[in-house]
Amino acid sequence: MILPHLAVRALSASVQCPVVLDGRISQNFTLENFDTNVSPYNPGFTKGSDPWSKIILFPTVPTPSRFDAAAPAENPQLGFRRAGLLLGNGSDASNQGVMTFHWSAMQDSARKLNLTHEYLTSFHETNDSGGAQFALQVGLPLGQNGTEPPKENWKMLDRNNSVVFTTPLKFDTWQNWAVTLDVPQNTMQVFFSEGNEPLKAVTKVLPNNNAGGGALQIGMLKKPTETKTVANDGFQESNLSEGQILGGIFVENSANGCISL
């Protein structure tokens, strides 16, 4: 599976707040750097046996995103198709105070998603892997034949997997996301824009269980169909070549209400 493309750093909007974790990469960053500790992402997670240099491609994009400028597993998860860049280590500063998680996504016309499956493309997974403080979902939710919102819509989910915001998936422009987590107050707020438009709040400040620490995963988790266990069985097409173009990935300190829009 060819998974995320990453747009190299070429800022078109300035970050306004102290950056806690920076997932943006320089113009001279190589694919092989993703396999080493030079990378801002954990080189070992979350993926199969192939190194990141064989999973990630560098794209050619019309414009930069807004804020850009091991051995096989003994118990492989045969149901999932999963490769996600992990930004953070689960106990870093992004798990404290008020933090805003930023990323942008553009669809790859040559490697389209199969929206009859459910995908999680960005989520903050807890340290025990038992849940996520937030998750961005697209496609047909597992076990459903037809839903509102439709499968062609992004759905931002809270800790309880409730949809707090939805918007159509676009195929010809950057879609920019930010989620603010207030860890002590157990709240979340979602921001969104398209192209180079400033981010706007698309939810109020909402109650959310932010306990459990964790780290931001950016990439793709594709769930199977016809499955009993989700992780270990089910149907996936062979010779998958699906992906998204990703950019503008960073976490900023939003103490005192500071958010880069």
Image (spheres, rainbow, N blue to C red):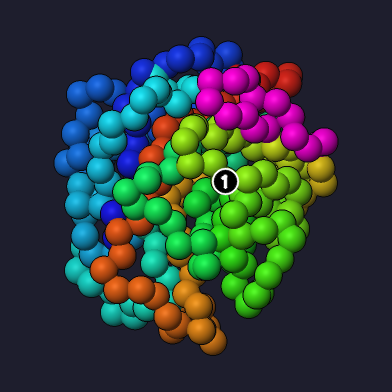
Please say whether residue 204 is one of the residues in the magenta stretch. yes
Q: In which quarter of the image is residue 182?
A: top right
Would you say 244 lies left or right of 139 here?
A: left
Q: Where is residue 193 in the image (x, y as percent from the top left)?
A: 62, 29
Q: Visible in this render: residue 180? A: no
Q: Where is residue 100 in the image (x, y as percent from the top left)?
A: 62, 32
Would you say 172 lies left or right of 200 here?
A: left
Q: Mark 1 points at which residue?
A: 169
Q: Visible in this render: residue 155? A: yes
Q: Which of 35 and 67 is in front in this view?
A: 67
Q: Residue at x 35, y 73 (%)?
A: 237
Q: Does residue 94 lie above or below 218 as drawn?
A: above
Please say whether residue 66 is one of the residues in the magenta stretch. no
Q: Does residue 98 lie above or below 41 as drawn?
A: above
> In the picture, which quadrant includes the N terminus?
bottom left
Q: What stretch is highlighted in magenta?
A: 191-205
Q: Position of residue 181 (x, y in %)?
A: 68, 39
Would you say 250 lies left or right of 191 here?
A: left
Q: Which residue is drawn at 59% across and 73% down?
A: 142
Would you say 14 lies left or right of 204 here?
A: left
